[in-house]
Amino acid sequence: MNISGSNISAFYQSSAVLEKQKSLLANAAGTKDSNKAKEAAQDFEAFFLSRMMESMFEGISTDGPFGGGHAEKVYRSLLLNEYGKTMAKTGSVGVADFVMDSILKMQEAQSMGAIDETEQA
């Protein structure tokens, strides 16, 4: 297995984005605003889809008269991020629905925990 510096860099970038997504989901779960929860779920789905498409496009050669190089990698990444956002907005995949349900369940559990704590006091 050959691990290059760009693969390691991509891994760290992906893990940083995942941490940001986890933070957004945690913040959405802590609030009662369903719009923020829906937005966080859509953002997660867009991130998931763009990472999935990155792995799909990874093996495609871009060498040619007008392709290749570092700029190709940058623009492909931007394009795939936009594809992921567009696909998430349509709701056709359904990942955001499951994430949204999980956020709502977390909110309910937190509110029930707060009610139980006030009853015990």
Image (cartoon, rainbow, N blue to C red):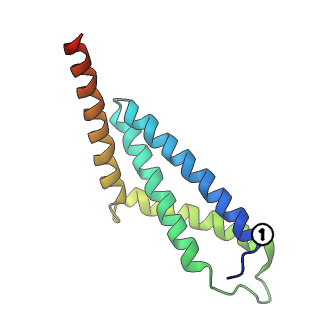
Q: What residue lies at 53% left-to-right and 65% top-to-bottom?
A: 50
- Does residue 115 appear in the picture of this structure? yes
Q: What residue lies at 62% left-to-right and 84% top-to-bottom?
A: 59
Give left or right: position of 97 versus 6: left
Give left or right: position of 77 versus 108: right
Depicted 111 relative to depicted 78: above or below = above
Q: What residue lies at 62% left-to-right and 51% top-to-bottom?
A: 16
Residue furthest to the bottom in view is 64
Depicted 99 relative to depicted 74: above or below = above
**Amino acid of disc 1:** Gly
Residue furthest to the front in view is 120
Judging depth in this view, the residue of 48 and 68 nearest the camera is 48
Residue 30: x %, y % from top left: 39, 31
Give the quarter of the image for residue 36. Answer: top left
Q: Count all numbered tags in the image, as a single digit.
A: 1
Depicted 8 relative to depicted 44: above or below = below
Residue 101: x %, y % from top left: 28, 47
Q: What residue lies at 56% left-to-right and 45% top-to-bottom?
A: 20
- Does residue 85 appear in the picture of this structure? no
Secondary structure category for the residue under label 1: helix
Give left or right: position of 89 versus 70: left
Residue 13: x %, y % from top left: 66, 57
Quadrant for the N terminus in the image: bottom right
Depicted 8 relative to depicted 15: above or below = below
The 10 Å Cα crowd at callout 1, few under 14, some 14 to 19, many 20 or more, is few
Quadrant for the C terminus in the image: top left
Q: Which residue is mark 1?
A: 5
